[in-house]
Amino acid sequence: MINSGKEWNWMDDKSQQIINKINKEENMKPSLTQQLIEDARDIMESFDISPAMTIGFDKDEYILTPKQMSIIANALYLADCEISVQKIIDKGTELIEQNEIRNKKEVIKVPIKNRHNPLAEKPTNNTVKVVYQNHVTEYDNIHYPQAFITKIQRNKENNDWTEIWLNDERIKINESKDLPF
């Protein structure tokens, strides 16, 4: 509690600022999508005598005007677009976070002299990075990435990796058939 002179106030300044921000946001004008969804909801509820109780629709057929159909279709379209955009944002955020984690770990580049395959001496554009809890192991000059990644996945002695990357593209674990080549 904070003593504000004559009376006790149970909220500090930060809490009051948050409450004020929420109140401002609640009074904001709804987005076009929100408005169309509200209009579509009104249309759907107009078919029932007690709209607050509407759970399903009992008639075999309902008649909509072209304007009503357009409102419902636009609401669905914009809602779908917003969901798709949010999925893209979420995926992008996830990739950025994964990349930041991967970049913070020590990267151990495996020297050619420690590699078993003589093809490692011949240059290619393929680089495989195997991410472990505390470090990243990087292999360059990989001629057969799918086989290389499959071997890593099946190696029982060294299976504590968390991610595998091919040319800076994350490979889905245990799905090497879907490699991007």
Image: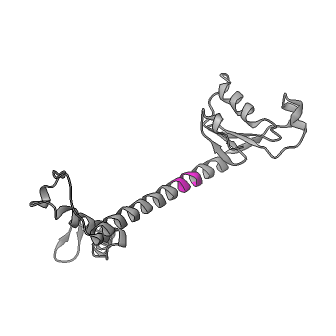
Q: Is residue 140 above or below residue 156?
A: below
Query: Residue 145: in sight, yes or no?
Result: yes
| Percent coordinates x, y for residue 146 in the rendering | 72, 35
Seen as rendered, the residue at the extreme left is: 49
Residue shown at the point (60%, 39%) measured from the top left: 172
Query: Residue 22: in sight, yes or no?
Result: no
Residue interval drawn in magenta: 91-96
| Percent coordinates x, y for residue 22 in the rendering | 30, 70
Is residue 59 magenta-colored? Answer: no
Q: Horizontal placement of 8 versus 123: left or right?
A: left
In this view, the residue in front, 39 or 99, is 39
User: Which quadrant is home to the C terminus?
Assistant: top right
Residue 136 sits in quarter:
top right
Q: Is residue 37 above or below residue 159?
A: below
Is residue 93 magenta-colored? Answer: yes
In this view, the residue in front, 89 or 157, is 89
User: Which quadrant is home to the N terminus?
Assistant: bottom left
Q: Is residue 120 above or below residue 55?
A: above
Q: Is residue 39 above or below residue 86?
A: below
Residue shown at the point (22%, 66%) measured from the top left: 43
